[in-house]
Amino acid sequence: MQVSENFLSGDAKEALSSDMASRYSLEIDGKEAYGGAKFSEEVLHTTEKLVARLYGSRYAEVRPIGGHIASEIVLLSLVSRKDNVLSIPESNGGYTGYEGGYLPQMLGFKNYHIPYDNATQEIRLDKLEKLMQVTSPTLLVLGQSFFVRHYDLKAIREICDRHGTKLAYDGSHVMGLIAGKAFQKDVLDYCDVLFGSTHKSFFGPQGGIILTNDEDIYDTMSRNITWRSMDNFHPSRVAALGVATEEMIRSGEKYASLVASNSHSLGKELNDNGIGVRFSPWFSETHQILIDPQSLSKSGLDFRTFSERLEENGIITDREGRVGTAEISRYGLNNMHEIAELILKVFRGESVKDRVKEMLSNMSLKY
Ligand SMILES: *Cc1c(COP(=O)(O)O)cnc(C)c1O
């Protein structure tokens, strides 16, 4: 129940651990630079087509080896040194990489925080407009690591258009939900670029993808990959991504809608029965729910000690209060009353180790 992880199917694992895992592959001006790479290049282009088909985009870039690298490529391509960029602050669940000392310092731009309402999990559009007037940003990056609610993309696009600002969406956490049309399925109608990890709610191998309908952006990004952001793109990983994308095309919609409904139900079950979950009564629209730390501290627990206690019982979460439903949904689990009961028992100090072991031994991949 780790929000940043998922389960790789047997077929995807086979591709990932194939002989390609130790091979090089690179095209220069459309020609292979290495002998023996014909099929690796074919796998690359097949995967690009599959991913573009899945997201309904004109272009798909599948070489980035992670969501962070995908982000770096997008920023390198859309932002110049000394430009201003807006992103959601880490204190509101935004990604740490956009904070001053990381990507902004590396790439020489200045990051400003998008005004955000913690209580409603919404961007404050009136304040955003004012900040845009003052900073004239080149790029606004949406997306969070603690991510439970959609954005008003239409309104944000209109504000961006008024200020000549490009709009990017870091969907690292929600790529699988977007692919399965359960969350912000119209991102590419409003955003210039959608990018993110392929292993969080998207059940692929660890890696990153970038999608766009804009030819100029795509060409610029292509130039910013080889020898700038990376060299080898890990052909076996791309093969595994192709396999996972086929699986997502096949059953992504059922998977993603189960993920979203499981999150809401789990949030409600826990919140009704003793572990506070933030944002009642809707709790979450994604694959993660956020535990209210105050409800833990009353029992002398914090995120870390509670997560450690869960881990002793075979339930894996992060140490930051997020609980994920992507992986259990991939297994087809839909009885959140039962899952909540296990978590609540651990919270009260009971052991559920044997019950969890038994459940795990009966589980098999559904989607
Ligand atoms: C996880 C995450 C990243 C980094 O992704 P990696 O695949 O680990 O490189 C970037 N942005 C956001 C919003 C994330 O949550």
Image (cartoon, grey):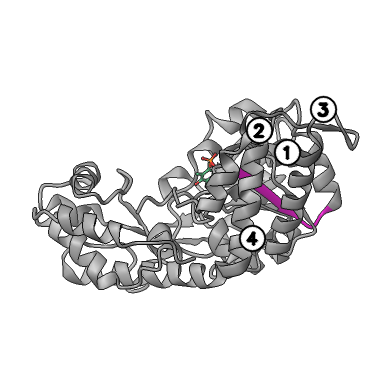
Label 4 Cα crowd, 10 Å radius (few <14 / some 14-19 / many 20+): some
Tag 3 and tag 2, C-beta contact below 8 Å: no
Magenta region, main secondary structure? strand
For marks 2 and 1, give the CA distance: 7 Å
Label 1 Cα crowd, 10 Å radius (few <14 / some 14-19 / many 20+): some
Which mark is first along the chain, 4 or 2? 2
For marks 3 and 2, give the one nearer the viewer: 3
The residue beneath circle 1 is 79
Residue drawn at 35 percent across, 72 percent down: 334
Q: Position of residue 46 (x, y in %)?
A: 76, 52
Q: Quadrant of residue 275?
A: bottom left
The residue beneath circle 2 is 109
Q: Is residue 71 visible?
A: no
For marks 2 and 4, give the one nearer the viewer: 4
Three-letter amino acid code of the residue under disc 1 = Val
Three-letter amino acid code of the residue under disc 4 = Glu
For marks 3 and 4, give the CA distance: 28 Å
Residue drawn at 68 percent across, 39 percent down: 75
The answer to whether residue 101 is above or below residue 95 is above
Residue drawn at 59 percent across, 61 percent down: 247
Q: From the viewer's perspective, is 105 left or right of 270?
A: right
Three-letter amino acid code of the residue under disc 3 = Gly
Tag 1 and tag 4, C-beta contact below 8 Å: no
The residue beneath circle 3 is 35
Numbered marks: total = 4
